[in-house]
Amino acid sequence: MIPLPQRGGCICGAFRFRLDEDPVTIYACHCTDCQTETGSACLLAVVVRSDAVTWEGVAPELHPASTPDGRVKDGYRCPSCRGPTGGQSRGEGLEMIEGGTFDDTSWIEPAGHIWVRSAQPWIEIPENALRFEEHPSDADWLEMTRHWKSRST
Ligand SMILES: [Zn+2]
Ligand SMILES: [Zn+2]
């Protein structure tokens, strides 16, 4: 278990959130869409139950974005600095918070890496993390959830 609550927010400080429960899982996505969207090598995604997170401060703006597997997600952006604050996977009762937006990032380590096929060549996937060449199946997601739980207890 990580110390709770965990807080975080955008870089200008207008948008804040509070997490009151251990995340469902943490993964890194190396797909090219995530590289473009984050302007970085990968997306660091902390998956949480929607009921476990409270959005504080200004209301985020919603920006719909398509995922590589064809789903549509609402991405949250701070209306002031336009910084990423997370996203919502529609209809699953889950939210995704971008790992780097937490005040304390010391506990954030991906249980799995997805779309490793398109990862930057200098990225080394740790041996204790799950590895998926493309988009994980439902069973793979479940395994990633179990893997995070087993490492965080
Ligand atoms: Zn991705
Ligand atoms: Zn902001």
Image (cartoon, rainbow, N blue to C red):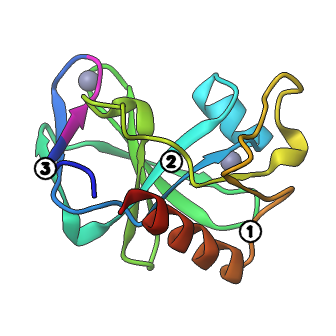
Q: CA distance from mark 1 to mark 3?
A: 29 Å
Q: Residue at x 67, y 39 (%)?
A: 34
**Number of residues whose C-alpha sits closer than 10 Å to that of mark 1, classed few (under 14), some (14–19) or many (20 or more):** some
Q: Label 1: which residue?
A: 136
Q: CA distance from mark 3 to mark 2?
A: 18 Å
Q: Is 68 situated left or right of 42 in this image?
A: right
Picture coordinates of residue 104 (x, y %)? 27, 30
What's drawn in magenta, residue-wise? 7-11
Tell me the quarter of the image containing the C terminus: bottom left
Q: Label 2: which residue?
A: 45
Tell me the kind of residue under disc 3: Pro
**Number of residues whose C-alpha sits closer than 10 Å to that of mark 3, classed few (under 14), some (14–19) or many (20 or more):** few
Q: Nearer the viewer, residue 119 or 36?
A: 119
Residue 95 shows in the view: yes
CB atoms of marks 1 and 2 within 8 Å: no
In the rendered image, residue 83 lying in the magenta stretch gets the answer no
Q: Label 3: which residue?
A: 5
Vertical position of residue 24 compared to residue 57: above or below: below
Q: Secondary structure at mark 2?
A: strand
Magenta part mainly helix, strand or loop?
Answer: strand
Picture coordinates of residue 105 (x, y %)? 35, 31
Q: Nearer the viewer, residue 61 or 5?
A: 5
Picture coordinates of residue 127 (x, y %)? 74, 47
Q: Secondary structure at mark 1?
A: loop
**Mark 1 Cβ inside 8 Å of ligand 1:** no
Counting residues from the start of the chain, the first of labels 1 and 2 encountered is 2
Q: Quadrant of residue 134?
A: bottom right
